[in-house]
Image (tube, rainbow, N blue to C red):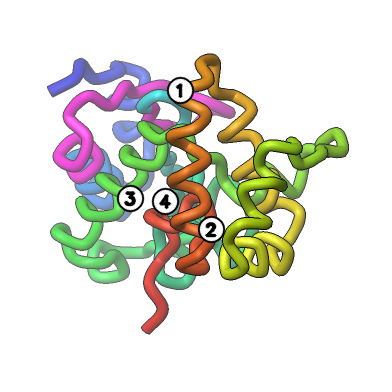
Amino acid sequence: MASKDPRIDAYIAKSANFAKPILKHLRKVVHAGCPEVEESMKWSRPHFDYKGVMCGMAAFKEHCVFGFWKADLILPGGNTENTAMGSSGCIKSLADLPNERTLIGYVKKAAALNDAGVKAPWQFQRKKKEPFSVPDYFTAALKKNAKARKTFENFAPSKQREYVEWLTEAKREETRNERMATSIKWLAEGKPRHWKYVPAKK
């Protein structure tokens, strides 16, 4: 288990009595779901990092909050507040939290997203991107597969960009060709670039 930040110990100790068991439980769950997690204090609140910010928690006078940086891609209901923190609602007791197994599952998914370098949707919304163009070699490949071409053309620019950037970031031609073959296959199946991390529809 990764070492714990004493500043978080102090934060919990200073919290209201109702908040202490909640914060301790959340901390334990995060470490259980991601043993390599690193603790830190950001914006005066406890955070847990793994290859980037993963989640954080905070205590207030009458409630606590716990949120995943990429909640839209992790929680069934997404991040209703469209922010990095929050997404859990007001937590006034342990009964307000999902069961431990479910929470650990969320943490594992958050770690997997960071492993894959997936960005949160709200990060794309806040950061303006330069216009992009589809490489000729990708356009040619799309013309050979009607289903893939139709999917790509119907995608929003942000989803098109994800595929284009994946291809153009390849340093070797062999890698690029492998990614292009995979891209055409996924597009023919109607899948976005990061389809593995999109919550399944019920």
Separation of residues labelled 1 and 2 (CA atoms): 22 Å
Vertical comparison of 15 with 158: above or below: above
Residues shaded magenta: 29-49
Mark nearest the camera among 3 and 2 is: 2
Q: Dots 1 and 3: beta carbons under 8 Å?
A: no
In the rendered image, which quarter contains the N terminus?
top left
Q: Nearer the viewer, residue 65 or 142?
A: 142
Instruction: Determine the secondary structure under disc 3.
Output: helix
Where in the figure is residue 42, as x and y percent of width and height? Answer: 52, 26
Dividing the picture into quarters, in which one does residue 167 lie? top right
Residue 177 in percent (x, y) is at 50, 32
Q: Nearer the viewer, residue 58 or 181?
A: 181
Mark 4 or 3: in front is 4
Task: State which quadrant residue 174 falls in.
Answer: top left
Q: Which residue position holds label 3? A: 19
The amino acid type found where label 2 is placed reads: Pro
Rendered view: 137 above or below 29: above
Secondary structure beneath disc 1?
Answer: helix
